[in-house]
Amino acid sequence: MNGLLVTGGVVFIAAMIASAASVAPIIRFARRTGYLDIPEGRKDHPHPMPYGGGFVILVGVAIPMLVGLGIASLPALFERLPADVLPLIDGVRRRGAQVAAVVAGALLLMVLGYIDDRRKLPVWPRLLAQGLAAAILVASGLHVTAWIPWPWLQTVVTMGFVILVVNAHNFVDNANGALGGVAAIEASGILVFAIAQGQWFVAALAACLVAALIVFLPANYPKPRLFMGDAGSFLVGFLLAGLVMMLRYDDGSAPWRTFLLPSLLLLVPVIDGVLVTVARIARGVSPFTAGHDHLLHRMAAAVGSRDKAVHGLWTLAWIGVLAANALSGIPRSAADLAFLPVLMTILWVRRRGVAPA
């Protein structure tokens, strides 16, 4: 176990270093190429802001995972590792196709989001690309079973689930720090789940995502230098959808766990997605229409501050993952330890000042 913890720490730090090293070059690239969010229409930030936060996150996740896959493919190298690290390497070897699928799907959605940030795409091309990314996951053997006896229906449900999670996270990305903080908390919850189950490969992937997000968050909140953009929100939603599907929820005695626990782990996007979709359909408009009717906007109107509303989203996300862990019997001490890096980051960025209104 000690070897696994040390290896996990190394993976986490490597992901942080990779992400941190990419921040300045990505900002320079965005400014040089005009990859900027221009304040106009419903956007109220005062100056053009570089996009590219998704690239920072992708670097932190993809590089450690691809290095791990390379190590796992070289027996002469991984056989020299401590015996208690071998379960992690074995997980990478067995799930090599899923690693490749996650990276390929993430890259596809990054390209989609990049184009969408540059020139707003119609809904259908976005949905088709998201469906293709979901199909890549299915082809790698990753799918939602949910007590469904027919494989074809499992495939349909899986693709629908991925598309819904991707777009729900895109909905949350409507204020500085909102999606970055919520996603970091969600990934921490998945990390706790994976460690408790001994799913070391999933834990490593979740740790990389947590590390990348806590590098991105201070660059985005409260005084932003970098926006996530659709490229980032699509990527984050896709990675979290894949991680949630990789976890095991059903212990054979409580089928409800398969449905309730993933919903708690992704509580904020679930609530926001349902709220916005129902409200817009009731008004006779497309759920994909831009507007100020998201959960954050409603909270900000209630408390009189967008900054406090962002903190409210973080708190709600935390309640969701803590409830999921409690229902699974995961010790609170283990959860607190895994959440510590995210908690420290959130406390730090809150002390740096108030986000622009």
Image (cartoon, rainbow, N blue to C red):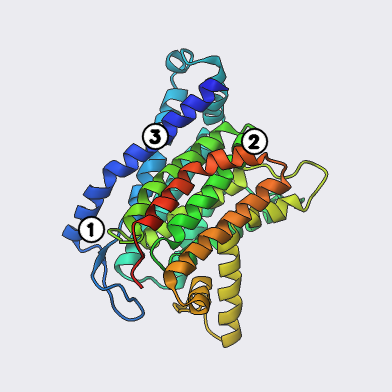
* Most foreground residue, 183 or 170: 183
- The residue tagged 1 is 30
| Left or right: where 84 falls relative to 43 | right
Query: Distance of mark 1 from mark 3, alpha carbons?
Result: 26 Å
Asked whether residue 206 appears in the rendered view, the answer is: yes
Label 1 sits on a secondary structure element that is: helix
Residue 321 percent coordinates (x, y): 61, 51
Q: Earlier in the sequence, mark 2 or mark 1?
A: 1
Label 2 sits on a secondary structure element that is: helix
- The residue tagged 3 is 13
Residue 5 percent coordinates (x, y): 52, 27
Q: Is residue 136 above or below residue 18?
A: below
Going 43% across and 52% down the picture, which residue do you hit?
Answer: 347
Q: Identify residue type, mark 1.
A: Ala
Q: Identify residue type, mark 3.
A: Ile
- The residue tagged 2 is 196
Q: Earlier in the sequence, mark 1 or mark 3?
A: 3
Mark in the foreground, 2 or 1 = 2
Residue 114 percent coordinates (x, y): 33, 60
